Amino acid sequence: MTLEPLLILELAAIGIGTGFLAGLLGIGGGMIMVPFLTHILAGQGAAAGLSVKMAIATSMATIIFTSVSSVRAHHRIGAVRWDVARRLAPGIVLGSLIASLGVFAHLKGSYLAIFFGLFVGFSATQMLLNKKPKPSRQLPGPAGQAAAGGLIGFLSGLVGAGGAFISVPFMTWCNVNAHHAVATSAALGFPIAVANVAGYIVSGQGLEQQPAGSFGYLWLPALLVISVCSVFMAPLGARAAHQLPVTQLKKIFASVLYMLAAYMLWKGLTSA
């Protein structure tokens, strides 16, 4: 199997952009990656509903690599709250497996596209509002954090994101320092991605109308090119997070998310 040079450049651009954003804003990149991959996969011959599912699964798989690269950079400056990550991780793994092994395979691709669009629109709104938590609010106990992890893992499995759009607001809402929340979210991206990808591979066996290079719901050419590029860019984004005006950047990024959300809603509604 050979890839056209233009396709390689397109996938590389996605990897560079999402890798930098993974480090800068603590996101896995799925919010940007999925719409673009959906469009590319449709051009590679994937069925309409399947292109959305494969884009979500492939996006999630890249997070395995970007999260490792990003969290190393955050860990060097002592920003990761490993105590919080350990409490959230068990629920995250369980929620991820429920989503990727069961719900994901049975939902129509058009429904997933609509859900993705609504989720991204909600995430963009949260970015713009930037609500401040009450000073007295703290993280819940171990059971509460495990339950929160389950919700983070489940929703991440449905939209192909690393969970930052749920985990970062959750942690900051509980008065975890914003930089620590972003860094800890990057660490949580790894168990989210590994558990979900395992489910996507198992539940995606025997599919038809897949482009060349597919493995379950994963599209391996995109996974390879995007991962290589994003791994190099994630540490740069992580360093920039402590130097750039992240609040202002989030406002700009939110406007981009609204456009991508609109595209996915249109994709889902027209193919439903």
Image (cartoon, rainbow, N blue to C red):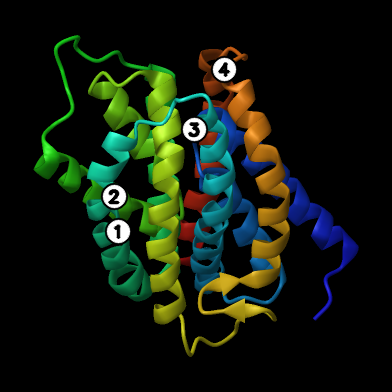
Q: Which residue is mark 2?
A: 89
> Taking the image as drawn, is residue 35 in sight?
yes
- When the figure is inspected, residue 112 is found, relative to residue 22, above or below; the finding is below
Task: Return the residue found at the far top.
Answer: 135
Q: Kindly identify which residue carries mark 4.
A: 242
The residue located at (68%, 31%) in the rendering is 236
Which type of secondary structure does the marked residue at label 4 adopt? loop
Dot placed on the residue nearer the N-terminal end, 3 or 4: 3
Dot 4 or dot 1, earlier in sequence: 1
Percent from the top left, x then y, of residue 170? Answer: 27, 31
Residue shown at the point (13%, 41%) measured from the top left: 142
Residue tagged by mark 3?
75
Hey, what amino acid is under mark 4? His
Label placed on residue 93: 1
Q: Amino acid at mark 3?
A: His
Q: Are marks 1 and 2 in contact (CB under 8 Å)?
A: yes
**Is the residue under label 4 in contact with that under label 3 (CB below 8 Å)?**
no
